[in-house]
Amino acid sequence: MLSYVEGEELHGGQAKSQLVRNAKNTVAYFRDYLGQEFKSIDPTPSHQSAHPIEHESTVAFKIRDTEADTENTVTVGDITTRHLKRLRTSASDYLGKIVNSAVITVPTNFTDAQKAALKSAAKEADIDVLQFINEPTAAVLAYDARPEASTADKYVVVADLGGTRTDISVLGSRHGVYTVLATLHDYDVSGFKLDQVLIDHFAKEFLKKNKSAADPRENDRSLAKLKLECEAVKKALSIGTTANFSVESLVAGIDYTASINRTRYDLLGNKLFAAFTRLVLHAVEKAQLDPLDINEIILAGGNSHTPKVASAISAAFPESTTVLAPSTSATAINPSELSVRGAAFQASLIVDYDSEDIEQSTHPACTVTKHLSQAVGVLCISGDESSGIFHPIIEAETPLPVRRTAIIATPREGGDVLIKLAEGSRHIKVTKPEPKPKKEKAEDDEDDSDDDSEDEEEELREKTWKIGTVLTETAIRGIKKGGKVEVQINISEDLSLNTIFREVGGKGGVRGVVPSKVAENGSA
C-alpha cells in the first residue's frame, strides 16, 4: 500500500492512515493486479482506495503523485516498482549495505505472466530476482530452518487467512524436499470479511445509541474510520480478552466509543471461522489425504493471530496434528513474517551461486520429477504371516531418486526372520461403537434429546496399511534374541531398487537388485 500527499510518497502503515482523508491518492492491494489484463481483475479490494482503471489493456490508477493539482495515470507495474524501491531502501538502511538482489515469494496461483511482470518491476527497482518461491513453501522452510526442527517425513498444511483472500496448500515434506500436493484459493473468506463483521456490529451499536444519526457505512469517510478502528480492535483481541473502540466524529461530529470482548467477537465471526476450517478440510481431501495423515498445520497471515482461528482448526483435526500458531505454541513464528523469513533463508542458501546455476537448478527439468504414489516398506514375518507388521520406510509422494535407511525390530525370541519389501497403501479404518441399550423411561420423564446426544460415542478412526505388491523377499537366519535388522532402500528415477538387509551388530548382509519392471504396477 502506498499513498501520496502533496507529492510525498508514503508506504505501509502511514499510507493506510490516508484512507480516511486521502483515499483517492492511496493505492492498496495491487499485487494481484500485476501482469493481468484489466478485464480479468476483481477491483473489489480497492473499493475504498484509488480505483483501478484500464490503460492500454493493463491496470493503472489515476492519482496525484506530484505537488501539482493534475492527476497522472500510473500503471500497476510502476506502482510495484516504487514500492519495491522503498523496501530496498529500508532494507539497505537497516543492514548498512546496499541490497541488490532478493528471493521473492508469490502465491501458488501466480501465473508466468505475473511473475514476469514482477521480475520486470523489480529490475526497474534495481533488484535482481534470484528466485521466485511459493508462499507456502517459504512458510514451511521458515519452520524447518530452525535448529530444533525435525527432518522426518511429514504432511503439512499451510493455511493463509489473508486480507483479501484465503490460500490453502497441502505439502509433502520429505527430508527437506517439498512437494505441493494440492492448493485451494477462496476470495469469499478473508480478513476483510472479519473486519466487515466488526464494522457491522459497531455500526449497529452506534445507530442504537444515536437513532437520528446517519448510517456510518453509507459515507466513505465514516466507513474508512470504522474500518481502521475495527482493524485495531481485531489486533487487540488477538492478544487480550477485551478491546476498546473509539472514533472521533464518526458521523456529523458525533464521537463514538464502545468495547467488545473476545467471546463476542468469536460469536460474530463464527461463520467465517467455520468456513475457513471447511476450506482446510477440503484442501486435505483434494490432496487425497485424511485429517489423520496431517502432521502439522501452519497458520500464516496476520489474521492467524486470532486465537479462534487456531482453536477451530485444532478441533477439526486429531490431537496428533500440531497446529502452529501464536495461540497454540509459544515458539510459533509470527504468521505475518513466515513467508519473508523463508525467503530470507532461501536467499542465504543461494546468494553465492551464479545466476545461471540458480536458473538451471530451478528449471522444471530439475524440479519436476517422479514421485512414489504408494509407500514402500518392510513386512517383518516370523512364523505366521498374518502376524506380520508393515513398517513404511519411504512414504508416498517422495520424489525420486531416494535413499532411506531404517532399523527394524524383530521378534524377541530371535531366530530366522523373513523380511518382505512391499508397497503399502494407507487406509482409514472406521470402527463404529455398538449402540447402547436404551433405558426405559418413566411416563413422567421428559424427553431430553440433549442427554441422548451426549451419550452417543464418536466413531473410532485409525490409520491402517494395506499390503500391495511384494517387491522382494529376504531371509536372515540366526538373529539373536532382541536383535534388530538394518534395512537400506535405494530407488532410482527409473524405479529400479537396490536393497541391503543386515543384522545390526552382525557380519555381512544380503544385497539385492530389483529391475524397474518389477515396480511397473504404479509405484510412481
Image (cartoon, rainbow, N blue to C red):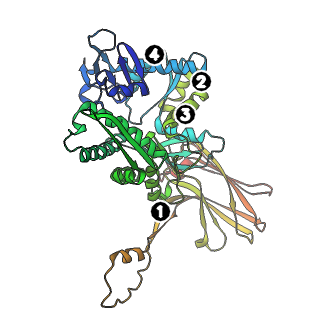
Looking at the rendered image, the disc whose residue lies closer to the viewer, 3 or 1, is: 3
Q: Earlier in the sequence, mark 2 or mark 3?
A: 3
Is residue 81 in sight in this rendering? no
Is residue 206 in sight in this rendering? yes
Q: Residues within 10 Å of mark 2 (few under 14, many from 20)?
A: some
Figure check: 120 above or below 307:
above
The image position of residue 443, as x and y in percent, is 30, 91
Q: CA distance from mark 4 to mark 3?
A: 21 Å
Circle 3 is placed at which residue position?
Answer: 341
Query: Residue 125 got which mark?
Result: 4
Q: Residues within 10 Å of mark 4 (few under 14, many from 20)?
A: many
Figure check: 326 above or below 49:
below
Circle 1 is placed at which residue position?
Answer: 427
Disc 3, SS: helix
Q: CA distance from mark 1 to mark 4?
A: 52 Å
Disc 2, SS: loop
